[in-house]
Image (cartoon, helix red, strand yellow):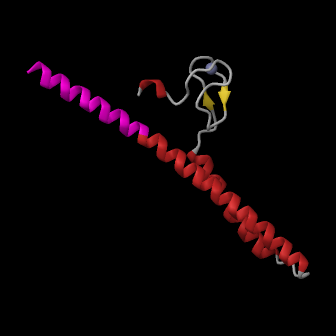
């Protein structure tokens, strides 16, 4: 039956689209989680260095350890977020979290398809 075929074709199409959307959403969530972790660790680093300074007991090994953790998180973040968020309409490069092109206003992330 033609109706049934169309129905399943459309359903499959919607299902596929929502799976793509979930992929994008999950990437964004984990990227902001990593950013949050980086900021938290940078705060810890500040506290650590300042407390050590105050007690006149600078321990560069503990500082380096924390710095290394931050560095690893930054590497993870870079792998998550594409370097460039290039507009398909005008080729302008936008910030990774931009939803619209700052130059021509086109929708980034192909949201117009949903
Ligand atoms: Zn543009």
Q: Is residue 68 magenta?
A: no
In the rendered view, tell whether residue 67 sits above or below residue 35: below
Quadrant holding the C terminus: top left
Q: x%, y% of residue 44? A: 74, 68
Question: Could you tell me residue 51's position as x and y percent?
Answer: 84, 76
Q: Please say whether residue 10 is one of the residues in the magenta stretch.
A: yes
* Image: magenta residue range: 1-21
Residue under the point 70% across and 58% down: 39
Write the residue at 46% across / 24% down: 112
Q: In which of the image's four quarters is ligand 1 placed? A: top right
Left or right, 38 with reference to 25: right
| Position of residue 16 measured from the top left corner of the image (x, y, whole percent) | 33, 34
Q: Residue at x 48, y 28 (%)?
A: 111
Task: Pick out the residue farthest to the left.
Answer: 1
Which image quadrant for residue 72?
A: bottom right
Q: Nearer the viewer, residue 105 or 45?
A: 105
Q: Is residue 26 above or below residue 53?
A: above
Left/right of residue 11 with respect to residue 33 in the rendered view: left
Instruction: Pick the residue in front: 41 or 80.
Output: 41
Question: In which quadrant of the rendered view does residue 52 lie?
Answer: bottom right
Residue 106 in picture, x, y percent from top left: 58, 20
Q: Quadrant of the N terminus?
A: top left
């Amino acid at each position: 039956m033609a109706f049934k075929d169309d129905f399943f074709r459309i359903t499959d199409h919607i299902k596929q689209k929502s799976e793509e959307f979930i992929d994008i959403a999950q990437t964004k969530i984990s990227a902001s989680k990593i950013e949050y972790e980086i900021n938290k660790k940078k705060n810890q680093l500040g506290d650590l260095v300042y407390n050590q300074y105050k007690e006149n007991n600078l321990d560069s090994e503990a500082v380096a350890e924390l710095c290394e953790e931050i560095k690893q998180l930054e590497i993870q973040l870079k792998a998550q977020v594409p370097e460039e968020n290039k507009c398909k309409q005008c080729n302008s490069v936008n910030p990774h979290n931009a939803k619209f092109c700052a130059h021509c206003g086109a929708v980034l992330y192909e949201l117009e398809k949903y």
